[in-house]
Image (spheres, rainbow, N blue to C red):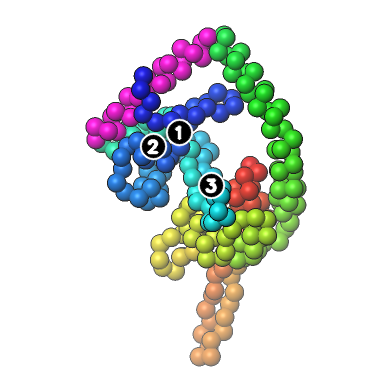
Amino acid sequence: MEEIIKIDTTQSGEQFVNARDLHKALEVKTQFNKWIERMIEYGFVDGTDFWSFLSKTSNGGRPSVEYNLTISTAKEIAMLQRNEKGKQVRNYFIQVEERYKQLASDPSYQMALGLKASQLLLEQKDQIIAEMKPKALFADAVATSHTSVLVGELAKILKQNGVDTGATRLFSWLRDNGYLIRRRGTDYNMPTQKSMELGLFEIKETSIARSNGSVTVSKTPKVTGKGQQYFINKFLQVA
């Protein structure tokens, strides 16, 4: 069977594909970032149907948001293209799944998979502990904080811990990923319903007395202690 798109396997044996590889295989003309955002809006859930992460750049430039997709999600996205290439890629995934099921039922394959996972864990154990311990401790310390911070202050915290971002870019990322409202209007940059339900933000209201005697209320989104841990985990990949 000719390989149309690279399929990777997690240490637990689950298969996945990179969204950029799928974008290339489907020969989509739309820019990747716009295309993947539109695909995700069909109802796919981060952490279940796909998982997002920040890429590491070799030249120290701004990291980009990348996506790995489950095979089921990749198949659905292929069909959403509604063209012959989409059908071809979907059929390829079906063939791969059938082959994987046959291998999965083979005891020798399961043994080899287990040995490979054990070897990888042993090789990476010390490196993982060294890299993740300070980040995990930092994130846990933030979780105990009862003080909410402005988005700009969170950007400074992230930058101090190796994430190349600033307030403007962080606001943009939060809007693009559904944490803050993108629609221009009175609620622009306010937390989305999802963010509030997760307890990631709170809204600080400040009354401002005008010279003409009127009073207006200013609303400012602030990241809660839980929200700080959530975003630090997401950017530093502790979670």
Residue closer to the observer: 52 or 199: 52
Instruction: Write down the residue under mark 1.
Output: 17
Where residue 38 appears, x then y in whole percent? Answer: 36, 47
Q: Are marks 2 and 1 in contact (CB under 8 Å)?
A: yes
Residue closer to the observer: 94 or 45: 94
Ranked by sequence position, the earlier of labels 3 and 2 is 2
Q: Where is 122 relative to 184, above or below?
A: above
Ranked by sequence position, the earlier of labels 1 and 3 is 1
Instruction: Return the residue found at the far left.
Output: 84
Residue at 49%, 64% in the rendered image = 189
Left or right: where 90 falls relative to 226: left
Instruction: Return the residue found at the far front.
Output: 59
Say what secondary structure mark 1 lies in: strand
Where residue 27 appears, x then y in whole percent? Answer: 30, 40
Residue at 68%, 60% in the rendered image = 160
Left or right: where 129 falls relative to 37: right
Residue closer to the observer: 209 or 117: 117
* Mark linked to residue 55: 3
Q: Report if residue 103 lies within the magenta region.
A: yes
Instruction: Write down the residue under mark 2.
Output: 22
Q: Are marks 3 and 2 in contact (CB under 8 Å)?
A: no
Where residue 15 appears, x then y in whole percent? Answer: 49, 27
Residue closer to the observer: 175 or 1: 1
Residue at 59%, 26% in the rendered image = 11
Residues shaded magenta: 83-106
Left or right: where 47 falls relative to 121: left
Location of the N terminus (image quadrant):
top left
Residue at 48%, 38% in the rendered image = 68
Numbered disc total? 3
Q: Is residue 192 visible?
A: no
Q: CA distance from mark 2 to mark 1?
A: 7 Å
The 10 Å Cα crowd at callout 2, few under 14, some 14 to 19, many 20 or more, is many
